[in-house]
Image (cartoon, rainbow, N blue to C red):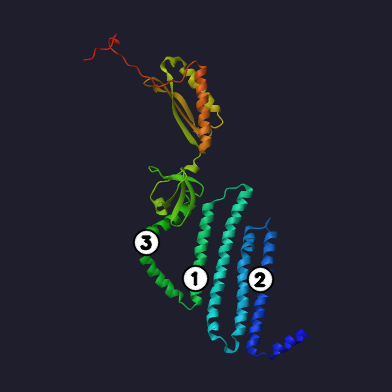
Amino acid sequence: MRFNRLINAFAGLDSYHQQWIYAALALLATLALTLVVHFVVRRRSGRHVAGQSAWRSAVLGALSAPLQVLVWLIGLSVAVELVTAEGHLPALARIFAPARDMAVIATVAWFLIRVMGRMSDGWRQVAGTEGARFDQTTAGAIYKVSFMVIALVALMIGAQTLGFSIASLLAFGGVAGIAVGFAAQGLVANLLGGATVYASRPFSVGEDIIFPGTDLMGTVQEIGWRATRIRGWNGKPFYVPNAKFNTETIINHSRQDYRSVEEFIHVPLQYLDTVPGIVDDVNRMLAQHPEMDHANAYHVFNLDSYGDYALRFILFAWIKSTTYLGYEQAKQDMLLKIAGIIRRHGAELALPTSRTLVSGGLKWPDEPPAPA
């Protein structure tokens, strides 16, 4: 009976109010469809995480929110079409159509940008799982270039949708670009420097770099379009304009194949007879040391000169470990073993000493002089 009353009440309404009821029902159906899309896409993306391609994982992971927005746009389009039928609410009908088109373009662009972001995260996870090296610099460059291209294309399509001429915009953009280029030469130089870093890849995120002749050195944390953030080895971050990389020499500390040890070791002059035995044993120890890069480098330990107070030996060797901690540990081990070899030959390490010759010797007064 109540259902029949509702039917009769609905039939008694005029067509305008009936359209509003239809619009409300369309929005309720849109809400229900949105929930269905959310759970279905979420379930599908969670089910195909393992063993699927990176593209499929990225698309499924990025699809949920943009697809729900598209469902709502369709539902709103149906509802607005119902309430604006027969010439009702002409202002809403006139405004909604271009706004809907712009929203669709923005949603598609948003979805593509989300896909590229998910792709970058997927590559990072795969590299971590397989133990491979993940190139953060390349991934960041791909994402940023993709973002700019997608945003630019979306803006051009949106302008065309709103009735603007693309040819006129491009012509105006060329003239404006020249003016902006002259007004912001530093910014343009930094942008070109960032592009050069992404193209030539003299360093990557996570690598240690040094600017020779300056105090600028540290670990690269982020390569932006304008500046690069570097964490100094003292823990303080600093930002280097990318234009600097086009003119300055950079040492990539992380890409060295080995590190060198150069030390001078002193033995007192009276142990001159032990020099041949010490040199032979130390060179034999270096030839067998596990940290020596025997395939690509060499080592030297010889008597270098007669110093001011002792015999001076020179130690020059290449160490395979390129990390600071590994380098210091290998260097310490070499120096301790050399000290042990010197002691085994009956010699010892020398300390800086000096002698003062006084003619006639020193004479001390028997008693202090009487006060004046």
Q: Position of residue 148 (x, y in %)?
A: 49, 63
* Residue 168 screen position, x and y as percent: 42, 75
Which sits earlier in the primary sequence, circle 3 or circle 1?
1
Quadrant in which residue 58 is drawn: bottom right
Residue 292 visible, this orientation: no
Front residue of 255 and 69: 69
Q: Quadrant of residue 291?
A: top right
Going by the numbered disc 2, the residue's amino acid type is: Thr
C-alpha distance separating marks 3 and 1: 23 Å
The mark found on residue 155 in the picture is: 1
Separation (CA) of disc 3 from disc 2: 47 Å
- Within the image, what quadrant is residue 192 found in? bottom left
Image-based side of 339 in relation to 74, left or right: left
In space, the residues marked 1 and 2 are separated at their CA atoms by 27 Å
Depth check: give the residue in front, 237 or 297. 237
The residue under label 1 is which amino acid type? Leu
Dot 1 or dot 2: first in sequence order is 2
The earlier-in-sequence mark between 3 and 2 is: 2
Q: Secondary structure at mark 1?
A: helix
Identity of the residue furthest to the front in this view: 371
Q: Is residue 328 left or right of residue 39?
A: left
Instruction: Confirm or deny contact between disc 1 and disc 2 (CB under 8 A).
Output: no
Which residue is labeled 2 in the image? 34
Q: Residues within 10 Å of mark 3 (few under 14, many from 20)?
A: few
| Residue wearing tag 3 | 184
Image quadrant in which the N terminus is located: bottom right
Q: Is residue 87 visible?
A: yes
Residue extending furthest toward the left: 372
Q: Residues within 10 Å of mark 1 (few under 14, many from 20)?
A: some
At label 3, the amino acid type is Ala
